[in-house]
Amino acid sequence: MKYHIQTFGCQMNVSDSDWLDRSLKSAGFEKASAEDDAGIFIINTCSVREKPEQKVYSHLGRLKFFLEKNPSAFACVGGCVAQQVGRDFFQRFPYVRLVFGPDGLGMVPGALKRLEQDPALKISLLDFEDYYPEKPGNWPERMPPRAFVNIMQGCDNYCAYCVVPYTRGRQKSRSSREIINECRELIRLGVKEITLLGQNVNSFGRDKNGLEISFARLLRELNSIQGLRRLRFTTSHPKDMSSGVIKAFGELETLCPHLHLPLQSGSDKILKDMGRGYTTQKYLELVDSLRLVRPDITLSTDLIVGFPGESDEDFQLTLEMMNDVGFDSSFSFKYSDRPGVRAALMGPKISEEVKSARLDVLQKLQQEWTAKKLARRVGSSDLVLMDGPSKKQKAGVYSWQGRDGGGRVVNIDFHNREDLTGMILPVRFTRAKKHSLEGEVAS
Ligand code: 5AD
Ligand code: SF4
């Protein structure tokens, strides 16, 4: 039977799904061209916010249509929602025959083979491992220019609103030797830019039972790999940003001037209730020291509105912080109670109307900043790594899309048709669009 993978949620989930896709192919499974061509439906889920969780249930409901047409077809649920809901999925949706948590991912290809052979079987892979569950890369022969490399799993921070420590387990750092080897292999396969992934990459190596090198040291080791042109990482926690990592931004040739640094709130009271472990003053100091070593650094962030007890004044402070920092971009969310987290017991809860109104104001302010920041780039030049042809093509030219050092999307028109994938070109920015730049190759 052919498989179809549907992914919800963050970059970690996308990267897990990519691994599963490669591994199923190399285990002999065939990928379906569309949902109605599939017999094995895999849903990789996320439960960080309420919305993605709802999406999983409605997606499973919708799958019934395909599953009723084909009696041997079945569904598999993986990722954070699977870890939380567990075997209850078997009761709620009889056609679900496999549930797997983040640590069970590596066993999925084997489990699918068993499920195909025995139609009565149901399998759950929900145990947490004590160590980072190493898996074979199963990389294809040729890779696109940008790739993601997992460096850790789980999180130990227990921020009051966050379900991740419960669904992804305690922090487990991957061995630096494995990370370095994987990066070398990817570069050999054509990769130019690597983004290191983890819930809190700055605390890499500082696991409960870990003996790994520090994150700053890991960055240095990776920077010295021959052929690596660009290095990025996400996500960082402000309380764990060491001076070594800040210094690295000023020193390491490959480290891109871009940092995603979730602020969550601009109110010290709310930050304290969230258990974030820093104040706005500390955050601003961090921004100053980053800009001192890398004045052109692009900063993006995550913000939550309507955390329990957030007053109008608290929200105003978040707007002020946005103006004080001037983020290039941000992701903002309405707070939602997640099962079992501390904030679920905190009050008073903020109404949906107030949350929506605050989110709207916040996002409008961000749009202004994004526009301002992009406009400032016009007239300047930077190196752009070409990803591939742009989605929108104009008549008479060949439009290509790439990213500048700060991670901004750049579109460039060429008169000749040639394959530019993976090239790093000097580009002068000519125009700012809402979320991207237009440019021309600088001579
Ligand atoms: N409600 C709303 N947003 C949340 N996030 C995490 N948990 C919640 C929640 N319960 C947001 C945070 C985090 C991002 C990945 O999701 O901003 O940085
Ligand atoms: Fe969740 Fe906080 Fe860990 Fe981020 S650092 S994954 S918000 S607990």
Image: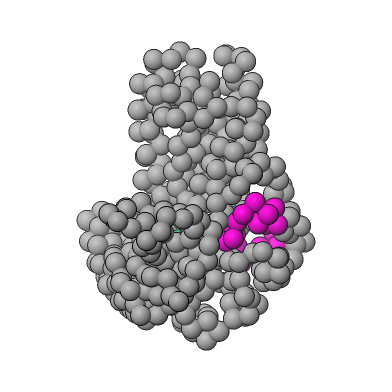
**Foreground pick, 75 / 424:** 424
- Residue at 55% of width from left, 48% of height from top? 15
Q: 313 left or right of 95?
A: left
Residue 3: x, y in percent? 51, 28
Name the quadrant of the C terminus: bottom left
Q: 388 left or right of 306?
A: right
Is 43 located above or below residue 207 in the figure?
above
Q: How many marks?
A: 0
**Foreground pick, 423 / 372:** 423
Q: 211 left or right of 42?
A: right
Q: Quadrant of residue 300?
A: bottom left
Residue 429 lies within the magenta run: no
- Residue at 41% of width from left, 50% of height from top? 49
**Foreground pick, 256 / 327:** 256
Residue 395: x, y in percent? 27, 54
Q: Quadrant of residue 58?
A: top left
Q: Quadrant of residue 334?
A: bottom left
**Foreground pick, 215 / 203:** 215
Is 130 located above or below residue 209 in the figure?
above
Residue 272 at least partly seen? no
Residue 374: x, y in percent? 34, 73
Residue 286: x, y in percent? 52, 80
- Residue at 65% of width from left, 51% of height from top? 189
Residue 203 lies within the magenta run: yes
Is 73 located above or below residue 295 in the figure?
above
Residue 392 at least partly seen? yes
Q: Which residues are magenta?
A: 182-209
- Residue at 29% of width from left, 67% of height from top? 433
